[in-house]
Image: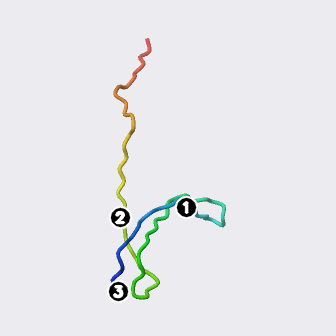
Amino acid sequence: MEPVAEIDNIYYGKDQDLRENGTVINEGLRIYLDSKGGSGNKYYRWDFEETWKFKVPNPKKYDYVMKQL
């Protein structure tokens, strides 16, 4: 493979994909990147690894337990 140019910009957009003869809509994200042209190649391949962090906005401090008499 030939070396590729530097990446100028990485961004994403919401996307929908139709599955099962157009009866099921699969929603997700599509990742795009912009770079300057290389030595005449039309296709390049990049790999990426996803890392997610989830944070609960208001964690509960107490558990309410109702006892029956």
- Element type where label 3 sits in the image: loop
Residue 1, position in %: x, y? 35, 86
- Element type where label 1 sits in the image: strand
Report the disc number at residue 49.
2
Check disc 3 and report the residue beneath it.
Answer: 2
Residue 37, position in %: x, y? 42, 81
Mark 2: give few (<14), some (14-19) or many (20+) Cα within 10 Å: few
Pick whichever, 30 or 26, lies toward us. 30
Pick whichever, 40 or 23, lies toward us. 40
Height in image: 15 above or below 41? Answer: above
Residue 66, position in %: x, y? 42, 19
Contact (Cβ within 8 Å) of mark 3 with mark 1:
no
Question: Which image quarter: residue 18?
Answer: bottom right
Contact (Cβ within 8 Å) of mark 3 with mark 2:
no
Height in image: 7 above or below 42? Answer: above
Pick whichever, 21 or 46, lies toward us. 46
Q: Residue at x 37, y 60 (%)?
A: 50
Mark 3: give few (<14), some (14-19) or many (20+) Cα within 10 Å: few
Question: Which image quarter: residue 33?
Answer: bottom left
Q: What residue type is labelled 3?
A: Glu
